[in-house]
Image (cartoon, rainbow, N blue to C red):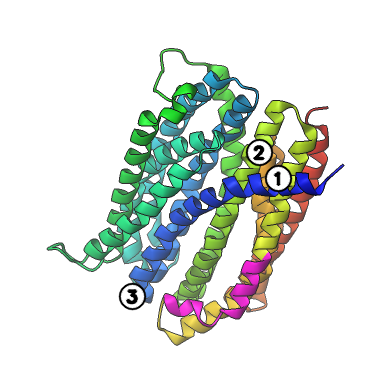
Amino acid sequence: MLTTLDLKLHIKETLKLALPISAGQLGHVMLGVVDSIMVGKIGSASLAAASLVNGIFFLILVIGIGLSMAATPLIAMAKGSEKLDDCGGVLNHSLIVNVSFSIFLMITAFLFSFLIPYLNQPTEVVKEAVPYLQILSLSVIPFILFQTYRQFLEGLSIPNPPMFVAIFANILNVFLNWIFIYGNLGFPAWGLFGAGVATFLTRSVMSATLIIFILKYNKVKRYKPELNFLTIDFSLIKKLINIGLPSGFQYFLEVAAFAFAAIMVGWIGKTQLASHQIALNLASITYMIILGISAAGTIRVGGAVGKKDVYHLRMAGFTALGFSALLMFCFGVCFILLRNFLPTLYINEREVIDTASQLLIIAALFQIFDGLQATGIGVLRGLTDTKIPMVISFAAYWMIGIPIAMLLGFYFELGAVGIWIGLLLGLTLLGITLLIRFNSRSKKILL
């Protein structure tokens, strides 16, 4: 039976993990927010190009992110069952899988840049977008390296070091943007391309810093984080792929939906695309915070599975789900109240600001369901349940959300607003369905 003491304990433990993870996630997304703000000072064409490329790039990168997340529940389970040596083994095999795949992703991102001219985008947007995606592609490997070591620490319930690295990275990124976007300290003004250079350098420093820290950190030495590829367990590699690839493709389906939405908005015009970028940038801030709660849910559910404790498994999952819904409700209220002010942080063009303020109302409406789906994916990953959620995501985004978005956006001529209403409906269905699935699966997982 649920007691007040149990509930307080679960909330405390969830927040203990979620706050630093959310801060770290927020640090990542703030790199993009700062880039958009600094690039937006150049003009709407640069901001629109940033919107297009960031959507495409993250669409590719997110598969690697999902793949890297397979290590977290396995490490949490190993720690929960007190098999400490297995934690380092998971890290080493995760490195083999993730680095190999990141090379493929880097090449894919670079080659995709040559397809941008065929996406029916404004000429001035295409001119800036192509070189920007090419330089961003070089940052895939350092980003995935950082992500792999971060998942290792989070699986051990040590989320603070990646958070501090992410905070430092933002300071570094602002400085490098100032140099390369605007042309300071003797460098030429590279505009949007300069933002890409700054991102590559920042991510390289992030990965190197976290790797060196882990190898020197006494607290994790008992988990054997040193590189050791003398013995390779192909069954573990297969397990990482079986958990990680569905997670990666689930995120791919989600990001693809928003990337395709950006392309559809681009068909309308650069003003609407710039407005879409602003609203999506702001919504991504709240989403990244919720990903911290989702990751905490993964870790705590995975740890309970390792201990074979069904009661605390369900409590950990529902605590994460409930807290994310409450927090996203608060964010939604903020979006509505500040809808006319927030876009002015990005750009001074009145038409862009007016359209972005309309999109923020829709973003406010889908906050709760976005929180439920993001956290639902996390707690189900803690059960190593990733394949069916991937199928559910496909149905929600691509059989319901996108078709309705196209219908409202173009047939009913609602423009970007209609496209965002379609996304709202897809997220609503997904959030409710994943909540129901966790309730069902968590009762059966250890029976």
Say which label, 3 or 2, has the lower sequence index.
3
**Front-most of residues 38 and 52:** 38
Asked whether, in this view, residue 226 is left or right of residue 3, the answer is left
Asked whether, in this view, residue 266 is left or right of residue 408, the answer is left
Question: At 57% across and 36% down in the image, what residue appears?
Answer: 245
Q: Quadrant of the N terminus?
A: top right
In space, the residues marked 1 and 2 are separated at their CA atoms by 9 Å
Please, which residue is most extreme toward the bottom here? 350
Q: Of the residues shown, which amino acid type is indicated by label 3? A: Lys
Question: At 82% across and 33% down in the image, what residue appears?
Answer: 444
**Residue that mark 2 sits on:** 300
In space, the residues marked 1 and 3 are separated at their CA atoms by 45 Å
Tag of residue 41: 3
Say which label, 1 or 3, has the lower sequence index.
1
Classify mark 2: residues with Cα within 10 Å, few (<14), some (14-19) or many (20+). Answer: many
Q: Of the residues shown, which amino acid type is indicated by label 2? A: Arg
